[in-house]
Amino acid sequence: MISRRRVLGALAAGVVPGPRFALARTGVEVGLERIEADQGGVLRGRRVGLLAHAASVTSEGRHAVDVLRGAGVEVRRLFGPEHGLRGRAAAGEDVASGVDATTGLPFVSLYGEKNKPTSADLEGLDVLVADLQDAGVRFYTYVSTLLLCLDAAAEAGVAMCVLDRPNPLGGDLVEGPERDPGFPFSLVSRAPGPLVHGLTLGEMTLYANARRSDPARVDVVPMVGWTRSMTWAGTGRPWVNPSPNLRSGEAALLYPGTCLLEATNLSEGRGTETPFLLFGAPWLRPRSLAASLSTPGLELEPTQFTPVRSPAAPRPKHLDTTCSGLRVRVTDARKVRPYAFGLALIAALRSQPEFRWVRDGAWLDTLLGTPRVRQALERGDPVGDILATDAPGIERFRRETRGLLLY
């Protein structure tokens, strides 16, 4: 076990000293803002590649590339995850490499032809800086992109620096299965540990790096003012969409559960104003469904909606068709267990004769990194029993990460 003191000691050269900076006006100051306040901090004098996206901004809306360059940091190359550097591409849409029109800098896409930087992409860099707002769940692709960058940096002998940001689910919530050891890796399944991991991306980088036989040189610039009990609402920070369909902290809190509906013939709300807070189908009987569910911290409101085409949802399920559904509202974020809710939701939906899996359930297996959950649902196992099988892995993960936590 690596102690927290040892981790912080090893990172001392790369962590901006805390006492010199006041909290941001929002209450939580992220790593990017600490670098700005220190006029480049640990990045001064280093040749930098920057992995960023649309939500890589200060509380006042300044993008990371502008902040770093304004602080005198030599940014040589930009890298972008799914949805691109500016967050305009739809889910699953390839993003091309080229030149960023705003800055004139070379841009390397890590979603499309390749998902991992090559040695040529990292040539001439001293450090690869990652500033990504994550969603706190393994199948949100940014964590996989970050870990592939960690691998590439280690292999190329380039340092990695993570500018930390809040986990919008907080740092206490841990839920769901681990990826089966033999299950194929993909961009929705690379992160170790349970599906909902409760770590910031800085902490996840430390955890993944500690598991490597050839660790990279890693710095984390931590936040100030963030505590593990905070969901997004507690940070006081404005929400900036990290992807086109994740549009609020409330939606992020439900996302690990309602996103599982992607594996079914129900709409998960894409093509509406509130994806992941709204779901349904033309055949759904929402009142009876709501009555069958236990929903701690949530309120379910029967409604109707019609998915429409948009740049964020070019091909939504049930396009231009009126759906009956439920609008989910968070009443107590501390009580919400999104993965448990999603699992209970699918279990209840399977009793309706119109229910169908997408690709015979293979997409659920991919999202969860295991076929075990789908097989248990198809056997009719109680949801409580399915959740109980995750408990040993969750407990082991909590033990392994305890000494690496930064907050």
Image: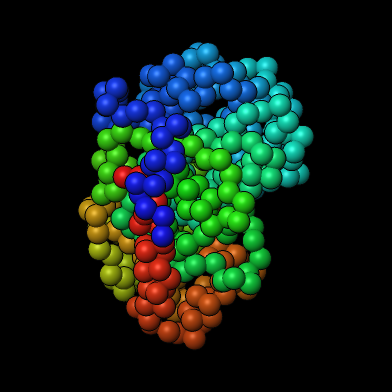
Residue 126 is situated, as x and y percent measured from the top left of the image, at 63, 29
- Quadrant of the rendered image containing residue 58: top left
Q: Residue at x 35, y 49 (%)?
A: 4
The reply, left or right, for residue 346 in relation to residue 371 is left
Residue 157 is situated, as x and y percent measured from the top left of the image, at 66, 39
The reply, left or right, for residue 261 in relation to residue 329 is right
Q: Residue at x 64, y 41 (%)?
A: 153
| Residue nearest the viewer, comparing 268 with 41 | 41
- Quadrant of the rendered image containing residue 391: bottom left
| Residue nearest the viewer, comparing 53 with 406 | 406
Asked if 366 appears above or below 154 in the picture, the reply is: below
The reply, left or right, for residue 376 in relation to residue 23 is right
> The N terminus lies in which quarter of the figure?
bottom left
Residue 296 is situated, as x and y percent measured from the top left of the image, at 25, 63
Residue 168 seen from this side: no
| Residue nearest the viewer, comparing 238 with 27 | 27
- Quadrant of the rendered image containing residue 37: top left
Colouring rule applied to residues: rainbow
Q: Residue at x 40, y 68 (%)?
A: 396
> The C terminus lies in which quarter of the figure?
top left
Number of numbered callouts drawn = 0
Residue 331 is situated, as x and y percent measured from the top left of the image, at 23, 52
Q: Residue at x 31, y 33 (%)?
A: 224
Residue 293 seen from this side: yes
